[in-house]
Amino acid sequence: MTFDISVALTWILFLALFPLAFFWLRRAWRILVKRDFSEVALKRGEPPPDAERWAPYEMAINGLAGIVVVFVIVAVVAYGIPYDTWTAIAGSTIWCKFFASFALGRHAHTLGAKQKA
């Protein structure tokens, strides 16, 4: 195997899965166990006024994404799943998590603003 740009990018993607899984599972843990709603449905770094209402959704998004990424890491290391498979699963998970968290944050703040008025 020669070291070229595609090998470097593959390693960067694989190594990036470790901190992603850690942060997403830590967020889910904070919401579920510690009842810390400071990172729930963020918009510009601020949680909505009724963050506890949106906590189960944010916990599910982060927990599911973290579990899928851990599954990908284990499958690559233990079972050697093909490159196309694990990159598709990891990439889809990352993008879906970002879009779902973004949508939840916008939805929570929009409803919060309507309820204030």
Image (cartoon, helix red, strand yellow):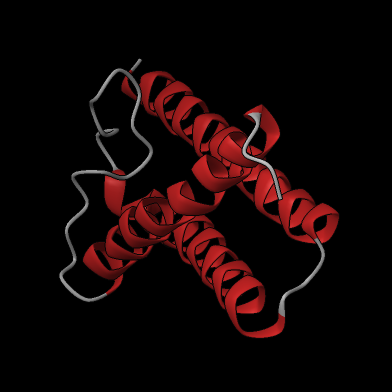
Relative image position of residue 80 (x, y in whole percent)? 72, 75
Give 110 or 80, whichever is nearer the viewer.
80
- Residue 112: give x, y in percent of width and height: 38, 28
Which residue is nearer to you in this view: 8 or 52? 8
Q: Position of residue 63 (x, y in %)?
A: 47, 66
- Which sits in the foreground, 112 or 35? 35
Residue 82 screen position, x and y as percent: 82, 65
Q: Nearer the viewer, residue 50 or 63?
A: 63
> Relative to 104, is 56 on the left or the right?
left
The residue sitting at the front extreme is 2
Is 38 placed left or right of 85 in the picture? left
Quadrant of image for the C terminus: top left
Q: How many discs appear?
A: 0
Say if 114 sits above or below 9 in the image. Answer: above
Rendered residue at 24%/34% (across/down): 49
Residue placed at 44% from the left, 20% from the top? Answer: 114
